[in-house]
Image (cartoon, helix red, strand yellow):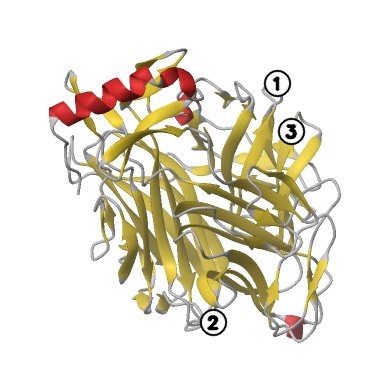
Amino acid sequence: MNTTPHHTTLIIFLATFIIQLGSYAQNETLTRVNEGASWKSDEVSANVRAKRTSSMPIQTGVYTTVTYSSEDYDVNGNFDHTTGIFTPPEAGYYVIMASLNWTDNNSSPITNDGIRSIILVKNGTTEVDRNDEVGRGWMHSSLHTVIESDGTDNYQIQAWQNSGSNHDIDGHITTDRTIFTAFKLRSREEYLTQINGGASWGGKRTCIKAKNSSGIPISNGSTPETVTYSTEEFDLNNDFDESTGIFTPPKAGYYVIMATANWQSTNTTLGERSILLLRNDGSTNPSTNTIMEENSEIGSNIMTSSLHTIIESNGSDNYRIQVRQNSGIDHDIGDASGVEATTFVAYNISDQDMVLKKESGGASWKANNASGQTCVRAKRTSNLTTTSNILSTVTSTDEDFDVNGDYDHTTGVFTPPAAGRYVIMATVNWQTGNSVAGRRNLKLVKNLTNNIEDATELGSSEMTSSLHTVIESDGTDNYRVRASQTTGLSQDIGGTTLVPGCIFTAYRLD
């Protein structure tokens, strides 16, 4: 895929561009363009965060485009919040993360049970991703994915439900509950990279999306089964084998992994459904596997299990998604209502490459991206007790990594070191031991008192609450994840040494 131009040609390019440095803006990197080279800005070409501040009714059986009350930011005007349409400004790969919080205005009688769906739609008609769940009352639908745009298409989030009556999605004036975020990845670009004392065009960054378009029966039992995939939408460096479900990072660095397992209507028996991320370290003992994390939920019928996290690869390990369930009979994962579902997404956010960047009238070798300055993954390996109706800060027992020391896992406080935009992804694993129905709530809080975003769901016993969003920091504030429940009893959140839970991850956007 990558070719190295003749050294003479490369020297001419370098001389030409270094001479012209004074006439260009700073914060640019020498980038391969049409077999030539050009200084390209390090600024992202699209970055959006929008929200609803009031509720929106979703009619039964009607696909409804979600619109938004306001935007926190829209760097280049790529999102029309009044129509809900996001138009990528150029060809490339974009992360889209969105959530819908269904209110309690449709909670009884029990006949109002039905499917609640969040759908990503391209050009008004083509469903790209979809997550479904059966329930009623307070529910939280979320979607996190990567799309490949040709630079002419557009995207929108739709909501759908079939309960037989209206069900509102929630908005709040002070706490965001129905959110849309999108930003562009730099996976297409090839930069001039320092290699073994010389220079060459570095490869494109890892960017993968695979999916499954047919049902896979998952046997009853405690043994996890590896998820395989029927097709890849894209895999820039051939780092993923869809037939085995194995992702092999090409070099040491930090990678985001996001995955879903869409449980189908083939099994209405109650039981635990789980999605796991498994790591195999080929550099030590290739037969030793480590469970990085597991998200579990008691339920039946149509459900979506999801996972979104950051991993640090040593360049010789590999990763796979597994699922398990204990309902007593098989339960299929795969296709969701005609949409290819059960997805796997991975992309590179930081590596050790040194690339040629502009500096005050000259150029020098510098780190590939700013995201290496902040990159955190923390977890719980023991339980933390929450008291009913009391908001508790989620702390961590361990950090897998904290590149810049921006997270205090003992207090649960994340302090961005500089003004900018940061991705935060967090899960809280509610443990068995409390089967009383009640709301489980997960909040992202700024400076202890300012509620930024929350996810609320009605349920009982084992559940997973999750948030994934982008925040804009002024460089002086701090953030923490807090959890609460309304069952009237205490309930533990957490994990174990073998199966960590309550994961907190954060990284700075390029």
Label pair 2/1, CB-CB below 8 angstroms: no
Q: Which residue is mark 2?
A: 268
Decide which of tag 2 and tag 3 comes sooner along the chain.
2
The residue that disc 3 covers is 446
As measured in the structure, the alpha-carbon distance from the residue carrying label 1 to the one carrying label 3 is 11 Å
Q: Secondary structure at mark 2?
A: loop
Residue ID at (62%, 65%): 156
- Identify the amino acid type marked 3: Lys
The residue closer to the viewer here, 247 or 274, is 247
In three-dimensional space, the C-alpha distance between marks 2 and 1, rounded to whole angstroms, equals: 49 Å
Place of residue 439 in the rendered image (x, y in percent of width and height, measured from the top left)? 75, 58
Specify the amino acid type for callout 1: Thr
Tell me residue 491's x, y (percent).
Answer: 67, 49
2 vs 1, front mark: 1
Task: Between residue 482 and residue 10, name the one nearer to us.
Answer: 10
| Mark drawn on residue 476 | 1
- Judged by depth in the image, the label closer to the viewer, 2 or 3, is 3
Establish if 421 lies above or below 91: above
Question: Label 3 crowding class (10 Å Cα cut-off): few <14, some 14-19, many 20+?
Answer: many
Residue 169 is situated, as x and y percent measured from the top left of the image, at: 76, 66
Q: Viewer-nearest of labels 1 and 3?
A: 1
